[in-house]
Image: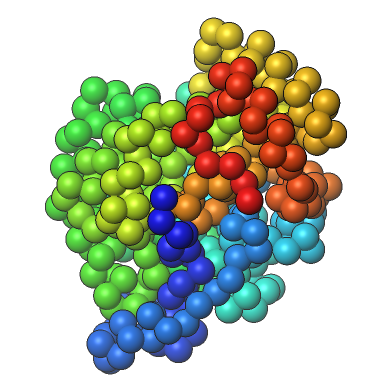
Amino acid sequence: MNSRRNFIQKSLQVGLTAGMATYLPGFGLTNPENTKEKMNRIKVNLPANFGLGGVAIGNGFRPTTDEQAQLALEGAWEAGVRFFDTSPWYGLGLSERRFGRFLHNQKREDYVLATKVGRILKAAKGAPTNNSWKKASPFDYEYDYSASGVRRSIEDSLQRMGINSLDIVFIHDLSPENGDMKDNWMEYFKVAAKGAMPELTKMKEEGLIKGWGLGVNRIELILETLKVADPDVCLSATQYSLMYHEDALDRLFPPCEEKGVDIVVGAPLNAGFLAGIDRYNYWGEMPEGFKEKRRQMTEIAKRHGIDLIAAALQFSAAPSVVSAVIPGTRYPDQAKANVAAMKVKIPQAFWEELVEKKLISEKAPWPA
């Protein structure tokens, strides 16, 4: 694979020089061409290609208090995390509000922020109960992948967070495993291809965002997007981990590298499974043989004097096309431990044994 493009490390602070209009509907910039030139010059370095995902902060799987969320974000910051990913969907606005409560007290040039579009939140008597969020905010939602929907969603997100700019915007959950869409996902995709995608490209050209892509749990949707648009970076969750990675190696990474599209790996621990929790990904369905595979990996890791979490996080960050991994947490100690895990030296013999026992693909890159 080619050397890492590191989109997230490039062109992320144009908002500091070009500025963002206070009110998004106006969106005025006086000289977009100068903005484009500045986007190519200004860089931000991320520590160890590592970030923090916002699912747990939004009460994913179980409740998190405001105080716990604040401590988790403080712990991540103290450990050096400067890339943060959230979404209106996470806790129905709860994750964004908590991220904003912390980040609005930091210098805007010191961190990189991503959120998502596709759902517009609406005040309701109570949150819908057919989702993974525990004690979510009292909002319902409607899907809107149109150009105007993107602008409204971003404005709403900035107001929830109390900050004035975004770096990356991911089009969220355009996928058949989305229970609201199922087999109709392509109809939503067509709307996004004509609305959200060209509008986000326009916003990038205006200097209002630094890049955009898809945030999905399936490979196919990213591949479809590459056919009709020119994304910069895509968030691929659950698709590249120690447990499951061959499909991404074969089908996702080559076309992304060819087109210069970076990948952010979400759920590198498969929603806690590789940390020892008997829950696989976001839906709870446990593939046959995966517990035994995890047991074997854990034993091999212990023999080599390492923790499986460290191996899993570094494995997901190893491919040249990957610009960041973003595990989530609700605990400050775990946030710090995850950052420390990226610095652990993994013996080459560990990876060799995993390949020998066919626990990982022989095509998978190893951490340097």
Residue appearing at x 17%, y 47% in the figure: 227
Residue appearing at x 75%, y 23% in the figure: 300
Q: Look at the picture and state if 361 lies above or below 212.
A: above
Q: Residue 31: x, y in percent?
A: 27, 91
Closer to the camera in the image, 239 or 165: 239
Q: Residue 329: x, y in percent?
A: 70, 43
Colour setting:
rainbow
Instruction: Count the marks.
Output: 0
Residue appearing at x 47%, y 34% in the figure: 363
Q: Residue 298: x, y in percent?
A: 75, 23
Q: Look at the picture and state if 148 lies above or below 165.
A: above
Q: Look at the picture and state if 42 lies above or below 71.
A: below
Q: Is residue 62 visible?
A: no
Q: Is residue 253 visible?
A: yes
Q: Look at the picture and state if 306 lies above or below 278.
A: below
Query: In the figure, residue 64 lies in which quadrant?
Result: top right
Residue closest to the far top = 288
Image-based side of 178 in relation to 322, left or right: left
Q: Residue 353: x, y in percent?
A: 67, 25
Image-based side of 109 in relation to 62, left or right: left
Image-based side of 249 in relation to 368, left or right: left
Residue appearing at x 58%, y 26% in the figure: 355
